[in-house]
Image (tube, rainbow, N blue to C red):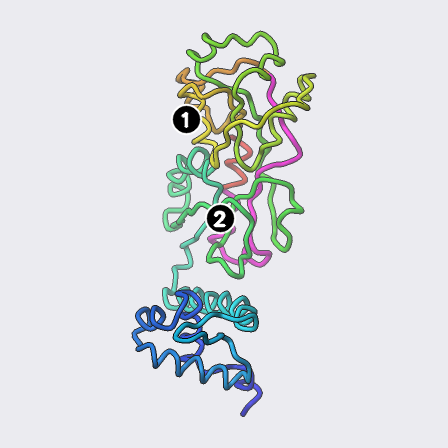
Amino acid sequence: MSNIRKWLPPMNALTAFEAAVRHGGFSRAGAQIGLTQSAVSRQIAALEDWLQAPLFDRIGRRVRLNEAGQAYADELLPALDAIRRATARASARPSQTALRVATLPSFGMRWLAPRPPQLTARHPDLVIDFAARSQPFDFGHEDFDAAVHFGVAEEWPGVAMDFLFREEAVPVCAPAWLAAHPLREPADLLQVPLLSQTSRRDAWPRWLAAAGVDASGLAPGPAFEHFLMLAQASAAGAGVALIPSFLIRPELEAGTLVIPFARPMSSEQAYYLVYPPEALASPAVAQFRDWMLEQAAGR
């Protein structure tokens, strides 16, 4: 057996093993990949023989992934997924002017979504697909050319990163709610529902501390995953929310949200454009980067 093939089991056996792991049994695995239960069982047995290690415990007519099988699956399944993604990219033969960009959901909806016509006017051949992602990821395992990140630079190692801008978060609520719950000073906020974004539960304690209010006894309030959900809840009268002002400019202009205290809060965290270090070799990525930096400078 050549060195290349020495540690590469038969693909049919790997496919059967993956299906059995994902679907929790040989019968369901067979239904998914078009084999009988016995055929799946034979493929798994062949893989176990190849590895010289059992991967499943047989308990009567039932099978259960054992510790060795789980450890093997934890490493194998992501590798198979990576092979599928690589094959899909190779088969699709994407245009040199097509990009996929991951963006934070609220940022994408409010800041990015209205702007592509300007990009299209400058680069008519450039086509960009935007998808929502909230956390850093490995560009080697995800089919993206670039992404928008909020945080500090050190949170996403191994990428190139361009600063876009910082945000200013402001307290907001519905005008009718404010009329029913007068807020005369920041300390009054301790007596009303304070709405948060799920990944920034420390925002209210930081804002109150900056306003000179002791928030040590502050009880956690309702939290929402996305800022636009948070804005909707506040506009509906659920309480006071702390939201980056650039994300709620339409609501502030329309008066559906008002600012009870003009005390914006910033931090060391910021929005960044991130991409693999070698990505700027692509003219399309370079064009998109230049446009993003220009947009951010003039926001």
- x and y percent of residue 119 in the render? 42, 41
Residue at the outermost front position: 60
In the figure, residue 27 lies in which quadrant?
bottom left
Circle 1/circle 2 CB separation < 8 Å: no
Circle number at residue 232? 1
- x and y percent of residue 177 in the render? 44, 13
The residue type indicated by label 1 comes to Gln
Q: Which residues are magenta?
A: 263-291
- x and y percent of residue 43 in the render? 41, 81
Q: Which residue carries the number 2 mark?
A: 287
Callout count: 2
Is residue 153 left or right of 19 when viewed as pictured? right
Disc 1 or 2, which lies upstream in sequence? 1
Closest to the observer, 127 or 14? 14
In whole angstroms, how far apart are the C-alphas of marks 1 and 2? 35 Å
Q: Is residue 74 in sight in this rendering? A: yes
Closest to the observer, 21 or 5? 21
Q: Nearer the viewer, mark 1 or mark 2?
A: 1
123 lies above or below 38: above
In the figure, residue 23 lies in which quadrant?
bottom left
Is residue 134 left or right of 213 when viewed as pictured? left
Is residue 124 left or right of 192 when viewed as pictured? left
Circle number at residue 186? none
The residue type indicated by label 2 comes to Gln
